Image: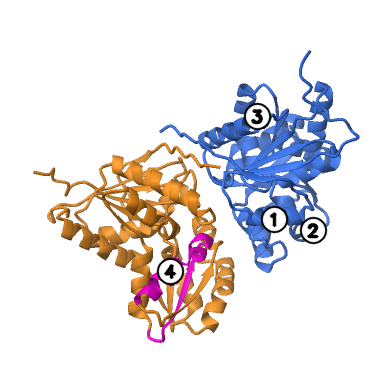
Chain colours: A blue, B orange
Amino acid sequence: MPTDRSLDPIGVFDSGIGGLTVVAALQNLLPAENIFYIGDTARVPYGGKSRKTVERYSIEIGGLLLAERAKVIVVACNTASALAVPRMKDIFKVSVQGVVAPGAAAAVQNTKNKKVGVIGTRATMSSGAYEHAINGLDPEIQVFSVACPLLVPFIEEAMFDDKITDLMLARYLTPLLSNGIDTLVLGCTHYPLLRDAIARIAGPDVTLVDSAQNCALAVKSLLDSAGLSAPSERLGRLDVALTDATEGFLRTAARALELEIGEVSLRSVQSTQES
Amino acid sequence: MPTDRSLDPIGVFDSGIGGLTVVAALQNLLPAENIFYIGDTARVPYGGKSRKTVERYSIEIGGLLLAERAKVIVVACNTASALAVPRMKDIFKVSVQGVVAPGAAAAVQNTKNKKVGVIGTRATMSSGAYEHAINGLDPEIQVFSVACPLLVPFIEEAMFDDKITDLMLARYLTPLLSNGIDTLVLGCTHYPLLRDAIARIAGPDVTLVDSAQNCALAVKSLLDSAGLSAPSERLGRLDVALTDATEGFLRTAARALELEIGEVSLRSVQSTQES
């Protein structure tokens, strides 16, 4: 008889702290589950780095989550989802759930005029992962994407309600809005923290969709079908590990998302990149 | 008789590409020297990371420079200079030259009213390295410092002449200007690329000083006194290695600084961080 793994944690990781938006959605939908979150703050950000490096970092952090007995791995980082999930699925036996597919599905469900905008890091945008996922579901949808490399720095400075952020957003979003999109995918797990500002600039005719809610639903379905769901009468806990001891933004994000964090610890990272 | 090391390269490193401003100053002053530059682009930026992590990364990149037979190591990154140079000097036999001491000396030479402003990354500013170095030379100088975490992202987006950059700069510099500084230290090797915009906002009464020129003079003096200078009739070459294959900003910076780069290669990084 197999060991009961239902009390083992859902393992979640991001290059930094943005993935806590996905944790908030998971806690909301699955309050009984334990969650172990790792932010790779020693090597943040992933968004400007190469596929090979992002794959290597993601596999390494995946290994750290397995060492915490993760029963499923949630890649709560769009860059890592776009670049590294296929390779992680090859390597790991547990299920690996990224955020690109859920975000793409949310956009396809929402759009009426079949014009969808996507914003994200440079690496996510140049991977074409969103176009591929959206057009895999509906080839008639036109996808317009813009890399927004400065939004993560603004968010990590907590510039949520700020004239300079609004100016930058207007610059990034103008080409998408001129193309008449009715749906905008927040293709980076940091961006929900900037949702109000993005909604202000995008205007009332554009629906913002993010992956967090759909990703949580996908995880629920994975756990249910594998018989791995935690008993519903309990209340799960959230533990966090970082690869560098820089807790400043962790506290900001946890406050903004009303997350209660248990233990915060440090983890080693060992990265070898071949030349 | 010792091996002649005069043709071995000057080893220079930065977390990314900003250190090329120091390379430009070195080439200008010491055209005969070979230079080997490493940008740790797989883990850029260092500016928000902890002392322990920055020390570890710096020692590791120092080792890679020694493997290239570096005859001196130039830490062309203010964060690494502020946090890691003492430890590097303990470990390595070759001379290690940072950029904080030369920048501090330039500020002390320049100020008339003994009010000096310093801008840099969050890690550099909170280390207090500039205050310490400046007051070590002249305890009467008042030092006002401001962390400017968004300037490196703006520079890496090549937003050199941009309304949004100017707005952000005005926000960062206003407290320094109200304190009546006559000298502003650009305490990050990226910032000389933004010198025009900074001068525009700071106005004609503030002199900008950076470490590059003084750092090059310090390296020249180190080499001369150790008998390690390259024969003057030759023309040195510049080779560059990156730890991640992201060459976009390398090309931008090299163009802006009119640098001719020889070979560009990749290097492995192996980083272990203790928990």
Instruction: State the SS at label 3.
Output: helix
Q: Residue at x 32, y 78 (%)?
A: B109
Tally of numbered tags: 4
Q: Where in the figure is residue A203, as x and y percent of width and height?
A: 79, 58
Instruction: State the SS at label 2.
Output: loop
Mark 4 or 2, which is nearer the eye? 4
The answer to whether residue B81 is magenta is no
Q: Nearer the viewer, residue B2 or B157?
A: B2
Q: Label 1: few (<14), some or many (≥20) within 10 Å?
A: few
Question: What is the spatial separation of the Cα atoms under label 2 and label 1, in whole angstroms?
Answer: 30 Å
Q: Where in the figure is residue B59, as x and y percent of width and height?
A: 39, 47
Same subunit: marks 2 and 1: yes
Q: Where in the figure is residue A222, as x and y percent of width and height?
A: 79, 27
Residues at marks 4 and 3 touching, judged by CB atoms closer than 8 Å: no
Give the quadrant of the N terminus of chain A: top right
First along the sequence among labels 2 and 1 = 2
Q: Nearer the viewer, residue A72 or B26?
A: A72
Q: Is residue B162 left or right of residue B56?
A: right
Label 1 is found on which chain of the structure?
A: A
Label 4 is found on which chain of the structure?
A: B
Q: Magenta region: which residues?
A: B112-137
Question: What is the spatial separation of the Cα atoms under label 4 and label 2, in whole angstroms?
Answer: 46 Å
Q: According to the image, label 4 marks what residue?
A: B130
Instruction: State the SS at label 1.
Output: helix
Identity of the amino acid at label 1?
Arg
Q: Label 4: few (<14), some or many (≥20) within 10 Å?
A: many
Identity of the amino acid at label 4?
Tyr
Q: Where in the figure is residue A107, as x and y percent of width and height?
A: 78, 41
Q: According to the image, label 3 marks what residue?
A: A66
The answer to whether residue A28 of the structure is visible from this angle is yes
